[in-house]
Amino acid sequence: MQYTTDIRVIRIMCTGRMDPAVMADAFVHGLDGLLVLGCLFGECHYVSGNFNARHKINMTKEMLAYAGMNPGRLSFRNLSSAESELFVKHVTDFSAEIRELGPLGGEADRVPLPKLREKLEIARTALAGPKLRWVVGKKPVFIDTGNKYQEVFTEHEINRTLGGIVVDEMATHSILAALQNKPASVKELAKELEIPAPETLKYVLGLKRRGFLEMESVKDHTPLYKYVEQEG
Amino acid sequence: MEKEELRIGVFVCKCGSNIAGSLDVEGLAEYASTLPNVVYAPWNLYTCADAGLEEIKKGIKEHNLNRVVVASCSPRTHEPLFRSVCGEAGMNPYFFEMVNIRDQCSWVHQDKAQAESSMDKARDLIRMGAAKAALLEPQEIITSEVEVRALVIGGGIAGLTAAISLGNRGFPVILLEKEKELGGMLRSLYRLAPMDLDASEVINAKIKEAEDNPNIEIYTGATIEKVEGFIGKFDITFSANGTSKYVRLGVVIIATGAGNLVPEGMYQYDGDKVITQWELEERFKAGKVDANNVVIIQCVGARSPERRYCSRICCAIGIKNAILIKERNPEAKVHILYRDLMMYGVENEDQLRKAKELGVRFVKYDPERPPVVEENKVTVFHHLMGKELEIPQEMVVLSTPLVGTEDGVKIGNLFRAGLDQNKFFLEAHVKLRPLDCGTDGIFICGSAHYPKDVRESIMQALGAVSRASIPLSQGEVKIEPIVTTLVNKDACRGCGLCVALCPYNALEIRDTDEGRKVNIITVACKGCGVCAATCYRHALSINSFTDYQMEAQIHSFMAA
Ligand SMILES: Cc1cc2nc3c(=O)[nH]c(=O)nc-3n(C[C@H](O)[C@H](O)[C@H](O)COP(=O)(O)OP(=O)(O)OC[C@H]3O[C@@H](n4cnc5c(N)ncnc54)[C@H](O)[C@@H]3O)c2cc1C
Ligand code: SF4
Ligand code: SF4
């Protein structure tokens, strides 16, 4: 058994350990590709860890793609511990795929560096935040037994919800990041972040209601918003 | 807390020529010595040999090391050894980190063209290991008391054997049988292959031995109602003959056996002229076998799309009963139509030879062209002769597989012991832990695990007893502290998100003075990390696999 020297192995107990924020952090730090290798579905050494991993990895891919990274850079593949040849195939394939994509922030990614890095950092913050984690954590439960009103959801329905939250989270965290830099008006934010102004206004008002923003001053009849430091 | 100065020692192993054959180990050691916080970085010929282990101990003492990294082979085989050596030298064993430059470098990158990139990779792996080591935290081995009492579920030959053996070792045993009588399948069988024993005699002797054993409490007509707890402290509620009982015990042996496939709709099965081996055994017992032209068909409902597995013991059963018919009436014509013969072991082979000597005919059939059963005859395509064969018959006997049962599924759910798609109990690892269930403290034996003959069931029962005796005789279990910890109690909202996802029921929500908080049942936790990766408040963390440690590995890789 021989294979490429392209990969570096990090040991985890189970793919269930893969935290969306940790995966995003790897790309923030410039990793070109992250391959998560785990047990075959139905044969997880930790019963169901790989199913949980799949939900989290899919969500992370969606978020990072939305931030401008080529989602092919993050991949989840499966094998049993007895399948050395399959291991070689997975790492060989993945290394070839990443070589094809080239370094992070190049042509294969929608957003170039250094802008991509900023966006990935925002994505990381969102993936560490409560909203996405809550929904992805509830996903297996909702698909299995339903919510407290006994409404069972299809995977497709939850993915749609998650997709919506990805968009909202990226927008709100971008707004927060921008306002942490300096106060700005809705119009300025909309221009800088390339979010339509009416949407931006909606997010800004939402954040203000939740106490993340407050009005700083009014300039030329337009309010300027600033970030409110959060406790804990 | 005062921050102590980090003093990392990196020991790079040559593994003879296993590593040194394609990596410049001395160069790697020299590189390691330049890494942040590394104060000592020797190389060893064999780090795991006595001399190498002594060097680790000496290094820890002489250089005041508080973190040790060994760059060598697989943690799967060597981590426990190195950890304990670090412990012996007075360092916390969990300040140890292992880097694999053999299985992940020297062995798999032997191409001369990879020489340089393999060295790069080895350097990276060592740097990443040292970066993680710097963030390791001390851990203590977890111990938990074991209630010295065992539960055996199922009173067949496997369960009885297990109960008797545990009883003889002096451990109190509770044996639960769901039927009114003990004995399982053997109560209904006639003779037992391959030793030609009387099945009733064998099982009755066992039942008596169990009943006479003062350490065994037997309950028949029993149903388990509730199971809580974990290894050492299982809390079981069961009912037997109308009364409900609660008991705490340390270990569980599952011996719930298997069922018999009833071949409805196959080969004209009617339970009268076309019967199963099971029904044939009943007729033998009642002395009601008088047919002289008998056709036995093997693999009925086994090794088929709906049941892919081989039931292993049906060939021996078919041949046993063919011999019995021939011995009763040497003039009888007995045909066995088979696909492959599974007569493993010397005694079984002797049986096969004996059957052939007695004149039992063997015809191999092709599952694509299965035999056809008709009134008074069976037609089968003879594989070797290449033509249809018509065999007259007065009785057809179908060899059907042992199948998993709904009882097994219920027990599996109660104990969170996994079953395979055929409803047989799954072992934790085929080779390394073949007698254990995935959940600690639960063991399996007999045909609940897979179709087995009596000897195999007995052997496996004795094996399961040896495994179960370890926690019982030690009186406590020791658990690797690679488990989840509530690192931020204030953050926890007691939402239960993690509780729902833990595959080992190791988490629960409790009311505390500070509100509802997660409580970790550390002995049950396997450290998979699902909970920590899920918690939306980042309240949980996995010892020795924290977010920070994983991130540090990646950061250090990128900082080349
Ligand atoms: C037709 C036939 C012929 C055979 N001939 C031979 C032979 O010649 N030689 C040979 O070596 N083997 C033979 N076998 C195989 C033999 O029967 C098995 O090896 C043996 O029965 C396995 O024992 P066991 O204790 O694992 O399971 P079982 O004998 O099936 O016993 C399991 C017991 O567990 C009980 N139980 C199930 N669920 C629960 C529950 N939830 N709670 C409490 N109790 C429960 C059942 O009631 C049963 O009493 C034959 C099998 C068949 C079907
Ligand atoms: S640890 Fe996290 S997921 Fe678990 S109950 Fe507390 S807040 Fe919820
Ligand atoms: S680490 Fe895994 S086994 Fe342990 S409590 Fe968390 S989810 Fe359960």
Image (tube, rainbow, N blue to C red):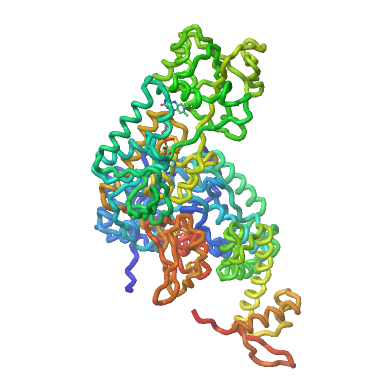
Q: Eyeballing the image, is A121 above or below B130?
A: below
Q: Nearer the viewer, residue B210 or B447?
A: B210
B478 left or right of B304 in image: left
The residue furthest top is: B331
The spot of residue A98 in percent (x, y) is: 63, 52
The spot of residue B303 in percent (x, y) is: 57, 29
Q: Nearer the viewer, residue B11 or B467?
A: B467
Q: Quadrant of residue B351?
A: top left
The spot of residue B174 in percent (x, y) is: 32, 46
B450 left or right of A70 in image: left
Q: Is residue A60 visible?
A: no
Question: Which residue is pictured at 62% across the width and 61% down the height?
Answer: A59
Q: Eyeballing the image, is B237 above or below B3?
A: above
Q: Eyeballing the image, is B291 above or below A27?
A: above
Q: Quadrant of residue B295?
A: top right
Indicate the quadrant containing the N terminus of chain B: top left, top right, bottom left or bottom right: bottom left
Give the total number of marks visible in the rendering.
0
Q: Nearer the viewer, residue B183 or B227?
A: B183
Q: Is residue B285 visible?
A: yes
The spot of residue B83 in percent (x, y) is: 32, 52
Q: Nearer the viewer, residue B23 or B406?
A: B406
Question: Which residue is pictured at 48% across the width and 22% down the height?
Answer: B283
Q: Eyeballing the image, is A230 above or below B123?
A: below
